[in-house]
Image (tube, rainbow, N blue to C red):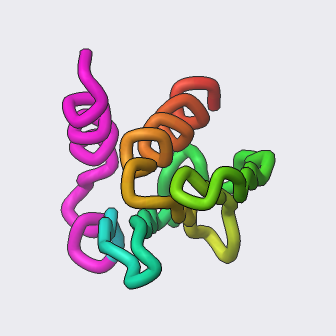
Amino acid sequence: MNLIAELQAWYEKQCDGDWEHGLGITIETLDNPGWSVKINLQGTNLENEPFQEMTDIEPEDAWIRCWVEDGMFHGVGGPRQLEAILQIFLNWAKDA
């Protein structure tokens, strides 16, 4: 299964009539440039799962940081790091 199909499957699994209305997934661009991914974990099986923060700020165009805070997965990274951010999330989701 490809990365987008995996993310879609994870998202669909969370949709219960409530979660998708106020929670969900946000993917945005950053002005430095780069990507920001936020995935609300409230009500999911990941809500209380430990996540090992991942930070790699070198090289400058391939930086990445992923962490969980206040029930939200956060992933930020350089302009070519969107796939890596999503893969980190999905690997964690599979292992939980």
Where is residue 34 shown, x and y percent of the image?
41, 67
What residue do we see at 46% from left, 80% from top? 32
Query: Residue 33's quadrant in the figure?
Result: bottom left
Magenta span dominant secondary structure: helix
Q: Quarter of the image containing the N terminus? A: top left
Where is residue 16 shown, x and y percent of the image?
25, 55
Q: How many marks?
A: 0
Position of residue 48 in the picture relative to residue 41 (left or right): right
What residue do we see at 23% from left, 36% from top? 4
Q: Would residue 74 be counted in the magenta stretch? A: no
Query: Residue 45's quadrant in the figure?
Result: top right
- Who is closer to the viewer here, 88 or 79? 79
Position of residue 16 in the picture relative to residue 77 (left or right): left
What residue do we see at 31% from left, 73% from top? 28
Most extreme residue toward the top, as rendered? 1
Range drawn in magenta: 1-22
- Who is closer to the viewer here, 87 or 90? 87
The answer to whether residue 3 is above or below residue 54 is above
The answer to whether residue 66 is above or below residue 40 is above
What residue do we see at 24% from left, 65% from top? 20
The answer to whether residue 87 is above or below residue 39 is above
Q: Quarter of the image containing the C terminus? A: top right
Where is residue 12 shown, x and y percent of the image?
22, 43
- Who is closer to the viewer here, 55 or 53? 55
Where is residue 77 shown, x and y percent of the image?
52, 60
